[in-house]
Image (cartoon, rainbow, N blue to C red):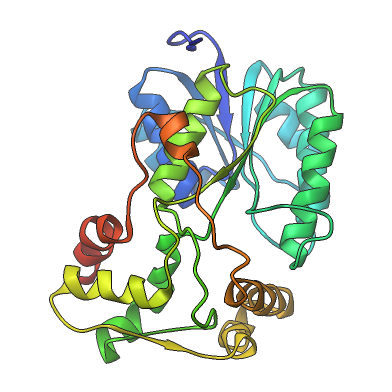
Amino acid sequence: MAILGPMTKTIVVTGATGTIGRRAVELLAAQKASVTALVHSADKAAPLEQLGARTAVGDFNDRASLERAFAGADTVVLITPPGPHAYEQTITALEAAKTARVRKIVRVSALKAGVDGPTDNTRQHGRTEAAIKASGLTYVILRPHLFFQNLFGSLPTILGEGKVYFGVGDGKMGLIDTRDASDAVVAAATRSDFDGETIELTGPASITYHDVAAALSRALGREITYVPVPPAAAGEAIRGWGDWAATVITDYCTAYSKNWGDFTTGEVQRLTGHAPRSADDFAREVLAPAARG
């Protein structure tokens, strides 16, 4: 097992203000790793600096800013926001990393990424993965399953109606806690054991949203039920985020409803040394405290 020595090689984390990135920064700083958090504006820097990270300002549409942020780094944890131009932005980051002589990329990709996947997000990640593999850089590609934390979007109806509305029907899927995704990122960034691998990350069980609602009921001490809606309705519910997002959610829900995500792996355990967190763990440790304010 090869482990990165403390304060020896700099790790840059992009997407550092997001759920996965922020926890990864926190964990790396706690290990006394030399970590730089990429932020889009200086006013986002203070909370990350308080964790023990350095910060750098960069933009995925500004290659020069990324080159400056990546200068001197050994490893870049590459987390980019989803969107219609995500592939182009990621390629900009990859080229900046090569110019800055970065050695290794840890890519947070998407479940079953592939150029023939069921959603545009899946297909863009498939193209990005191909570019990373062709770049000549050392890499680890992590593909997390659907996140439990997405349930925070349903918190108003969970609390107000005791219901979760979503468009995946009775489909089963290996949902994952973002904490486990962050833990896997840190393992991949600080160790060489997983170099060259493409790894699907899942939770411990393939479950339906009815099972998720049951876990929420146990944690909140009140009955929560799952109400399936058509995939298109799930897309329309987020139309305010833009047409691309609405289409992607519709396409994902269609795929999940047909059990596209009905599988689990043991990869969280292999990378992190601990079992992945369950629906009950998430509901009890994350959602219930948030619901109580």
Please indicate, yes or no, whether residue 45 appears anywhere in the rendered image: no
- Residue 210 drawn at (x, y percent): 37, 78
- Residue 38 drawn at (x, y percent): 58, 37
Indicate left or right for 192 with 83 as reference. left
Question: How many numbered tags mark residues here?
Answer: 0
What residue is rendered at 75% in x and 67% in y?
A: 118
Q: In which quadrant of the rendered view does residue 259 lie?
A: bottom right
What residue is rendered at 34% in x and 72% in y?
A: 211
Instruction: Note whether 243 is above or below 266 in the view shown.
Output: below
Q: In which quadrant of the rendered view does residue 130 lie?
A: top right
Instruction: Note whether 89 is above or below 97 in the view shown.
Output: below
Indicate left or right for 218 with 201 as reference. left
Instruction: Note whether 36 is above or below 142 in the view shown.
Output: above
In the displayed orientation, state which residue is furthest to the left: 221
What residue is rendered at 18% in x and 68% in y?
A: 219
- Residue 100 drawn at (x, y percent): 76, 21
Quadrant of the frame with the C terminus: bottom left
What residue is rendered at 48% in x and 27% in y?
A: 187
- Residue 59 drawn at (x, y percent): 70, 45
- Of the pair 139 and 116, the residue shown nearer to us: 116
Q: In which quadrant of the rendered view does residue 68 lie?
A: top right
Indicate left or right for 269 with 14 as reference. left
Please indicate, yes or no, whether residue 163 appears anywhere in the rendered image: yes
